[in-house]
Amino acid sequence: MTTVTACTNPNLALIKYWGKKSGYCDIPATPSLSIALGGLTTTTTIHEAVEDTIELDGRMVTDVKIENWLQKVRAEYSIPPIAIRSENDFPTASGLASSASGFSALTLCIDGLFSLRLDQQKLCWLARQGSVSAARSMYGGFVSLDPRTMETDCVQLQNFDHWDLRVVVAVCDTHTKVTSSTEGMARTVETSPFYSSWLSKTDQDYEDCKLAVAQKNFARLSEIAELNCFRMHALMLSSQPPLLYWNQNSLAAIGAIRDLQTDGVPVFLTSDAGPQIKAICMPESLAQVRTVLDGTVGVKRTIVAEIGRGPVVYSD
Ligand code: PMV
């Protein structure tokens, strides 16, 4: 076996984590629940080389995050130098969780090329050393990452075909974000006067969301996921200096989704540490939601995703 390729999906948190457990860089403070974004793919290929090289979206780069991660991996496993080639078919580093799909794909490639044969929890743990949400991209469907259950903290709650939901990503800016999520959440933990309230509310949001997903209750899911998203952005804004990830185009997209809701269209929104706004709807509303967002001034383009099936790994 000379090369291994892994294809993974980014994931979208419906219940967010924002803040790590005190003293840890890889354990979230609160549980989160995500969906895999099928149709958006990171494809990563690795092979042995004389020195480590990284090619991202066709360009040779120096990537400190990946280099640091490789150091952590090598502290556990004997891994020789590797050449990494990775491509995203969606904008990199702009709130579309490319680091989640990137680190999950890289973890699977290393496991495959060097026959580590790690179990699923160990794979999740390794991916999480690069980006905490990367653990959730080790599965398709509906996934939870719950630090309260240490042994089995990242699990698939439901398979991709449990519930046919669609996501319309309104791309509101394609530039790299200013404040990384790692830096941003550290700032929030240190400075927000509301951080303890966030910690006390998220467990319940997570339990309610889990139930809404299990029961396929769209109205309830809309309510909880939007509330949790707005609470996270309020928390970000309450940091010092404030973290504002949205721009005027994001607000235009939020307004357009609000108008659809007023017209009775079953759709809700969520957004992460970036300007992109994601509308979640049932397949029958997809065309209408997409048309409205495509026609919203400031929305650069839309990308449609469905619930992803999870990683695929192959070797040559
Ligand atoms: O995976 P990280 O450590 O880069 O943080 C991701 C944070 C959010 O996307 C804002 C929320 C989440 O749970 O995915």
Image: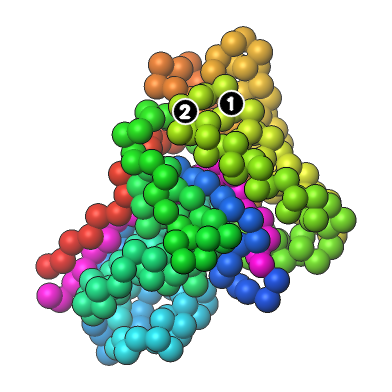
Extreme residue in the top direction:
263
Quick one: 69 or 197, which is closer to the camera? Answer: 197
Give the mark nearer the N terminus: 2 vs 1.
2
Quick one: 83 or 308, which is closer to the camera? Answer: 308
- Tags 2 and 1 in contact by the CB under 8 Å rule? yes
Residue 77 seen from this side? yes
Q: Is residue 303 magenta?
A: no
Q: Which residues are magenta?
A: 1-21
Q: Identify the residue under disc 1.
A: 220
Q: Quadrant of residue 296?
A: top right
Q: Quadrant of residue 225?
A: top right
Q: Residue at x 66, y 42 (%)?
A: 204
Q: Identify the residue under disc 2.
A: 215
Q: Position of residue 102 (x, y in %)?
A: 41, 62
Q: Residue at x 42, y 45 (%)?
A: 157
Q: Position of residue 94 (x, y in %)?
A: 55, 52
Q: Nearer the viewer, mark 2 or mark 1?
A: 2
